[in-house]
């Protein structure tokens, strides 16, 4: 799952980014409203956005309203140092899905993001499940046939992606971006390596691949 | 005696208290007493005028009677009129020119010596009664005619009866009317104090009651006070709100880094986060210090300034900010001797902030130029663009995309200190493209005597 973080404060941005990585997300971090608008206004892969309101060059509220005007429905959680109710109301009315006032607890930010992602997928349960596989994004635990399944961090993120987007296909580009983000220069086969490791743990029939469409979990 | 004295003192105290209690009481009593005093004087004058007129009337009547008696005597009919004189409580004594008593209706006739000078009314006591007498001299005889009279007492009683009681009642009425009138007259004051009593404690709007001329200055001053308190409170509130807002982000960062340091599953992240948390503490401390400095500066008014050369202050501030910097990083050019009146500790705070900014956002070497009107400090950094230049010095303003940490208050502090010294702060681009900060003191006014 790939998140976009827009926060101009270096120490806070760094902390949120590391915390979200710990929570099992791939995070891109921008420090500027104009850059954020540039990225979000073109086709993007982000599953959710964490947006600070007081941003240089382009105000967070401005980014938010322009984005909603484009018809983008990506879940957006707004962070702000202004805790007054009318600020929150303006933020929510402009198109924010949730609101968190600084300073906040990292766990709450993660929980709210998980909830946003659950709602965007119209899931009732906080668990993602497929056949006898269950994944809890809050604890990053996976069970296979009621047995705890040990996955590496990348395998977990890959499974989370496939579960979240089921029954839709994810292209190689989308998968690579959501898994590894923009920064890393990965070897061309590293996605295949992780996919094959996951197949070994879930069963060889678990992940379907259609040339030109990409990957998805097999039918239930 | 001492009892009387304490009694008087107590009365005076009570009167003072009664008068001090209300303006209306004072007005009533002062105008009331003044009016009654004038009345009393008029009454006395009236009494004397009336007595004089009455006496003249009496004199004319006695003289006419006396002349009539003398005429009767000349006609030899006097004895037959004795009863009349007695019935009218009159007593006469007729003397010849050489002082022999000719006739009298009184067993104890008035003597000549008793009755004073001739031709004027004379009051005297005779046989235990009050009399008024007159001497009439005509055709070689001398008549002393007297009438029993309590007329002065009667006159006083008459006056009291017809004027005194009505006056007393009128005086009481007057006091009541005055009391009522002064209350009405002081109505604007009452309205004002009512409005003041009704006000909420934090209501700082101007008073609405129209003030009469006598208290207009008072009300205007009060309104000015309200306005200035309102401005001060507003400024404090804005500052507090800004400060709370600006502290939230560093606190949030600090909290997140500490959470990571304590519970990130990645060893390296935990380690890094601890270092960043320390950085966060330093940053928050810096921000709090700057906030405190600024709020203190906001409250300061006039400074205790001593003329002194700036170069030693510049070097002292520089060594505090960059103790280990190479000597070539600061160049001081003294083009003209200049020793403005400054508060040394404030000016050092100003210089420290300028130097910290220059080192944080600009590049050494810093060039300080002292001229005869002030000083300029420029660095060799990238400088800022026009839009940023216009906003530098605004509280909490930080240029967009600024990677270096900072409070956004440094130049606000510089600006405020310049203001306290009456100096002008100018920001511009330096020749090398960096930022140039100028402090310009107003040229001292030269009078003819100093030229």
Image: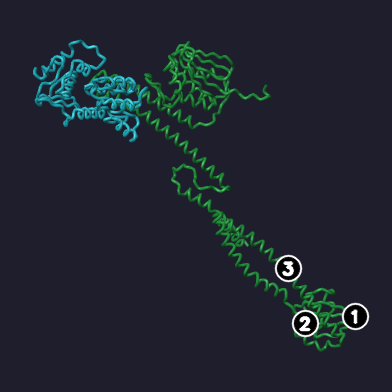
Chain colours: A cyan, B green
Q: Nearer the viewer, residue B2 or A128?
A: A128
The quarter of the displayed image where residue A189 is located: top left
Q: CA distance from mark 3 to mark 2?
A: 26 Å
Residue B382 percent coordinates (x, y): 43, 14
* C-alpha separation, residue under disc 1 versus residue under disc 3: 36 Å
Image location of residue A180, percent across then percent down:
22, 16
Q: Position of residue A203 (x, y in %)?
A: 9, 19
Under circle 2, the secondary element is strand
Q: Are marks 3 and 2 on the same chain?
A: yes
Q: Are marks 1 and 3 in contact (CB under 8 Å)?
A: no
Q: Chain of mark 1?
A: B
Tag 2, which chain? Answer: B
| Secondary structure category for the residue under label 3 | helix
The residue closer to the viewer here, A27 or B100, is A27
Which residue is labeled 2 in the image?
A: B90
User: Where B241 sits versus B177, above or below?
Assistant: above
Crowd class of label 3 (few under 14; some 14 to 19; many from 20; radius 10 Å): few
Disc 1 and disc 2: Cα gap in Å? 22 Å
Residue holding disc 1: B140
Q: Secondary structure at mark 1?
A: loop
**What is the quadrant of the N terminus of chain B in the image?**
bottom right
x and y, in percent, of residue B85 in the image:
78, 84
The label on residue B158 is none
First in sequence: mark 3 vs mark 2? 3
Labels 1 & 2 near each other (Cβ < 8 A): no
Residue topped by disc 3: B48
Give the left or right position of residue A116, taking residue A133 as reference: right
Q: How many marks?
A: 3
């Amino acid at each position: 799952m790939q998140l976009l973080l827009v926060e101009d404060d270096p120490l806070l941005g760094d902390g949120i980014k590391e915390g979200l990585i710990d929570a099992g997300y791939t995070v891109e971090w921008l420090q500027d409203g104009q850059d954020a608008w540039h990225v979000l206004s073109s086709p993007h892969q982000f599953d959710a956005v964490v947006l600070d309101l007081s941003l240089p060059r382009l105000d967070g509220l401005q980014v938010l309203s322009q984005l909603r005007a484009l018809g983008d429905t990506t879940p957006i959680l707004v962070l702000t140092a202004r805790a007054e109710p009318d600020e929150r109301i303006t933020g929510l009315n402009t198109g924010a899905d949730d609101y968190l006032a600084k300073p906040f607890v990292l766990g709450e930010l993660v929980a709210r993001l998980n909830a946003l992602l659950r709602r965007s997928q119209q899931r009732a349960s906080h668990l993602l499940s497929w056949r006898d596989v269950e994944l809890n994004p809050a604890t990053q635990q996976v069970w296979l046939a009621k047995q705890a399944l040990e996955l590496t961090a990348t395998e977990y993120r890959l499974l989370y992606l496939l579960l979240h987007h089921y029954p839709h296909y994810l292209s190689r580009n989308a998968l690579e971006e959501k898994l590894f983000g923009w920064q890393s220069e990965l070897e061309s086969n590293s996605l295949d390596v992780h996919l094959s490791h996951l197949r070994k743990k879930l069963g060889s029939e678990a992940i379907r691949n259609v040339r030109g469409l990409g990957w998805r979990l097999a039918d239930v | 005696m001492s009892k009387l004295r304490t009694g008087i003192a107590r009365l005076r105290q009570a009167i003072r208290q009664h008068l001090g209690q209300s303006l209306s009481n004072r007005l009533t009593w002062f105008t009331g007493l003044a009016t009654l005093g004038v009345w009393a004087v008029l009454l006395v004058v009236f009494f004397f005028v009336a007595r004089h007129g009455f006496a003249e009337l009496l004199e004319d009547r006695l003289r006419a009677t006396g002349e009539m008696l003398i005429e009767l005597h000349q006609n030899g009919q006097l004895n037959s009129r004795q009863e009349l004189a007695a019935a009218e409580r009159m007593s006469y004594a007729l003397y010849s020119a050489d002082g022999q008593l000719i006739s009298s209706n009184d067993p104890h006739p008035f003597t000549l010596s008793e009755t004073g000078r001739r031709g004027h009314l004379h009051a005297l006591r005779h046989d235990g009664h009050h009399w008024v007498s007159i001497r009439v001299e005509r055709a070689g005889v001398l008549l002393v005619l007297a009438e029993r009279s309590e007329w002065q007492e009667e006159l006083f009683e008459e006056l009291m009866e017809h004027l005194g009681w009505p006056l007393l009642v009128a005086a009481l009425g007057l006091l009541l009317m005055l009391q009522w009138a002064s209350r009405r007259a002081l109505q604007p004051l009452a309205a004002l104090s009512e409005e003041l009593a009704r006000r909420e404690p934090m209501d700082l709007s101007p008073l609405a009651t129209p003030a009469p001329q006598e208290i207009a200055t008072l009300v205007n001053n009060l309104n000015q006070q309200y306005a200035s308190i309102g401005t001060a409170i507003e400024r404090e509130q804005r500052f507090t709100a800004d400060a709370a807002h600006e502290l939230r982000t560093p606190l949030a960062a600090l909290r997140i880094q500490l959470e990571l340091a304590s519970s990130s599953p990645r060893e390296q992240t935990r380690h890094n986060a601890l270092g960043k948390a320390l950085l966060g503490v330093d940053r928050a401390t810096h921000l709090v210090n700057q906030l405190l400095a600024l709020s203190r500066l906001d409250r300061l008014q006039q400074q205790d300034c001593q003329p002194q050369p700036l170069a030693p202050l510049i070097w002292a501030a520089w060594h505090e900010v960059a103790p280990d910097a190479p000597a070539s990083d600061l160049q001081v050019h003294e083009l003209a001797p200049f020793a403005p009146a400054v508060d040394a500790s404030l000016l050092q705070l100003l210089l420290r902030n300028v130097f910290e900014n220059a080192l944080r956002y600009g590049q050494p070497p810093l060039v300080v130029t002292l001229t005869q009107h002030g000083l300029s400090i420029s660095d060799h950094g990238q400088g800022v663009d026009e839009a940023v230049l216009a906003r530098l010095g605004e509280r909490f303003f930080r240029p967009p995309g600024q990677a270096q940490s900072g409070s956004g208050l440094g130049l606000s502090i510089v600006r405020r200190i310049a203001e306290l010294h009456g100096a002008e702060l100018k920001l511009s681009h330096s020749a090398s493209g960096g930022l140039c900060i100028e402090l310009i003191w107003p040229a001292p006014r030269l009078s003819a005597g100093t030229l």
